[in-house]
Image: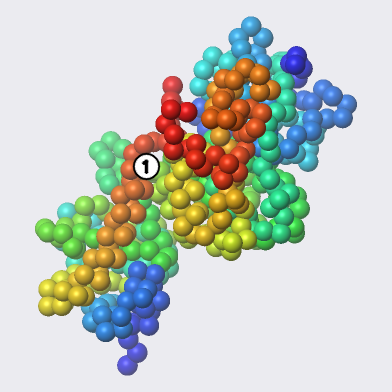
Amino acid sequence: METLQPILAEHPFFQKLEPEYLALITGCASNVKFDAGTYIFREGEEAHHFYLIRQGKVGLEIFIPELGPVTVQTAGEGELIGWSWLVPPYEWHFDGQALELTRAIALNAKCLRQKCEADHDLGYQLLKRFVTIMEQRLQATRLQLLDLYGSRT
Amino acid sequence: MVPVPCRVMRTYQETGDTFTLELESLSQDGFSFRPGQFNMLYIHGVGEVPISISGDPHKPESVVHTVRVVGIVTWGIKKLRRRDFLGIRGPFGTPWPVDLAEGNDVVIVAGGIGLAPLRPAIYDILARREKFGKFVLLYGTRGPSDILYFRQLEDWRARFDFDLHVTVDRAFGPWKGNVGVVTTLIPKAHFDPVNTVALICGPEVMMRFTILELLKKGIPEDKIFISMERNMKCGIGLCGHCQFGPHIVCRDGPVFPYSAVRHLLGIREI
């Protein structure tokens, strides 16, 4: 039976990951599709998965009373969404909406956490990749906070 | 240099605080400039400001400027109506190296109103599109309502020979485009780094982080060009108001090769 391993291997997030680890991760992976406008997750819900986007675009939103939903970041093809599954209490901090038809690989959080506990090398490989993304997003967020394009007067 | 009077043909609002002004060139030969240059715009009895030229260099019959209202002179310019006059001195400054970019891929990264001084370069490249490789425009701004030249960007995006991506820092309402800083678009853009010329204009911090991403992608330092902004007064390198280290921005810039100013960008005192 064909598995998702070749697809995972091609995703930038898993590039250069040893096949033995990929095989372990593949056991937690499933193919998912979201129509445009679908909420993939909501703030406060348990973070059961994280998603590797293969096609489409997902917006991370936060709801502000009187303003409505504000999109603070989008992720598209080749990118990843979600790290709440890594940090207790494993709850989403934003809403995630498919802005267009989105195909992704969903990785089951409980399954992955168990495998990482059992094999710390796998956990280290995953964390190295997540930390890189967190660093990039933290930098981007700091630039956003500067409001660079706002008027100085 | 004495300002030459020019007549306002039309003005149009681009965003909440930014408008585009189209002036009639009163010279018989029209108004000739190179992409990236600027004019000093003079409102009689109020003052003078340096403003980049944002029009098409292949259309000398008009002079086009996109202006953000930030002070009394720009406010005075905004109040001008059709057939009013304002004074112009220019064009001044160094241009974008569009000719040098021939035979290469071109990546333009613009932030906020930084798209205005780059627009003439875009017109120029599109006018002789066959002379360049891939052409990528990455544009970031504050929010969807701050996007300059909205209709024109839509038209350009419909072209098959132009890779254009827009992102905003945050979005309310029905926006379905990218959200995130402009630097996040760079890793996803497709071009051949070694054979690419990059033109960048925007707030200085945005340019610094953009340069880091472009270098990470493999574009050589000497193929990255930026447009610097300093307090320009005379426009001809005499008054020294716009001194940037050993450079006078109005005369030696505003467009600089990154390699020529790299060591200055980290010095806070200048």
Amino acid type at image mark 1: Gln
| Residue at the (71%, 50%) spot, across then down | B100
Task: Tell which subunit mark 1 falls on.
Answer: A
CA neighbours of label 1 inside 10 A, class few (<14), some (14 to 19), many (20+): some
Q: Residue at x 62, y 17 (%)?
A: B239
Q: Nearer the viewer, residue B181 or A29?
A: B181
Question: Extreme bottom residue here?
Answer: A1
When the figure is inspected, residue B242 is found, relative to residue A14, above or below; the finding is above
Indicate left or right for B124 with A82 as reference.
right
Instruction: Choose top left, top right, bottom left or bottom right for residue B23.
Output: top right
Q: Nearer the viewer, residue B69 or A19?
A: A19
Query: Which residue was labeled with disc 1?
Result: A144
Figure quadrant of the N terminus of chain B: top right
Q: Residue B116, percent across and down?
A: 60, 36
The colouring scheme, among rainbow, by chain, secondary structure or one colour, is rainbow
Residue reaching furthest to the top: B45
The residue shown at (31%, 38%) is: A67
Residue B154 lies, in percent from the top left, at 59, 49
Left or right of residue B20, residue B3 in this image: right
